[in-house]
Amino acid sequence: MSQRSEVAPEPLGVELDEGGIYVSYQDNRRVFYNGIPELVTGTLRCRPGKDVQVLVTDESETEGVMTYVNELKTADDILESSGVGRVYLDPGESTELFEGVVASVDGLAVEITADMDAVDGRVFVFEEDELGEQMYELSEN
């Protein structure tokens, strides 16, 4: 496998639907994340071994930015053309993905925390693997 690097996110189109979330990528793909997000207060601890994606919308909830945390499969050029970002963290490290949204790694688990006073829109976390996906929305503590 070739070397993977961190990639800065670009704005994406977002449409919130009663059955899930549509994301329009910069490469003209539109993906539907099916399901109603589970509301989580405080820190969301994702299960080890899952792919973690964080989507933060703007105040209008029609635009957002998405970043993968510790994702190793997608080539840099695919992420760059889609507008999705990527960060890597070692155990014990943390970084601010977006203003008010922090990702950290505890052991093998990714943790996401949001200061909703600093976030204009909404914060969604997608946790997935080949067996399925879970969707969460971070809310006020």
Image (cartoon, grey):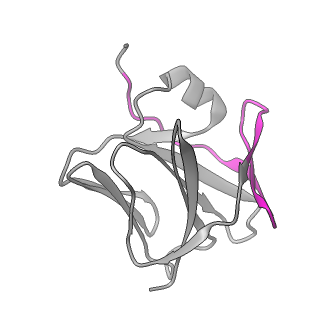
Residue at image location 50% in from the left, 82% down from the top: 117
What residue occupies the far front of the structure in this picture? 131
Q: Is residue 32 left or right of residue 45?
A: right
Q: Position of residue 88 (x, y in %)?
A: 33, 40
Q: Is residue 97 left or right of residue 123?
A: left
Residue 77: x %, y % from top left: 55, 21
Q: Residue at x 49, y 22 (%)?
A: 75
Vertical arrangement, residue 139 with respect to residue 65, above or below: below
Number of numbered tags placed on the structure image: 0
Query: What residue appears at the point 60 percent right and 52 percent down from the top-left corner?
Result: 65
- Residue 59, above or below 11: below
Residue at the far bottom in the pictured view:
141
Quarter of the figure with the N terminus: top left
Q: Find residue 58 and report its horizontal and vertical position in percent.
A: 66, 65
Is the C terminus in the top left, top right, bottom left or bottom right quadrant?
bottom left
The correct choice, above or below, for 25 with respect to 48 in the image is: above
Specify whether residue 9 is painted magenta. yes
Whether the magenta-drawn stretch holds residue 99 is answered as no
Residue ID at (73%, 30%):
27
The image quarter containing residue 49 is top left
Instruction: Using the image as rendered, state which of residue 35 and residue 22 is in the foreground.
Output: 35
- 57 left or right of 85? right
User: Which residue is more in the foreground, 70 or 33?
Assistant: 33
The range drawn in magenta is: 4-32
The percent coordinates of residue 121 (x first, y second) are 63, 71
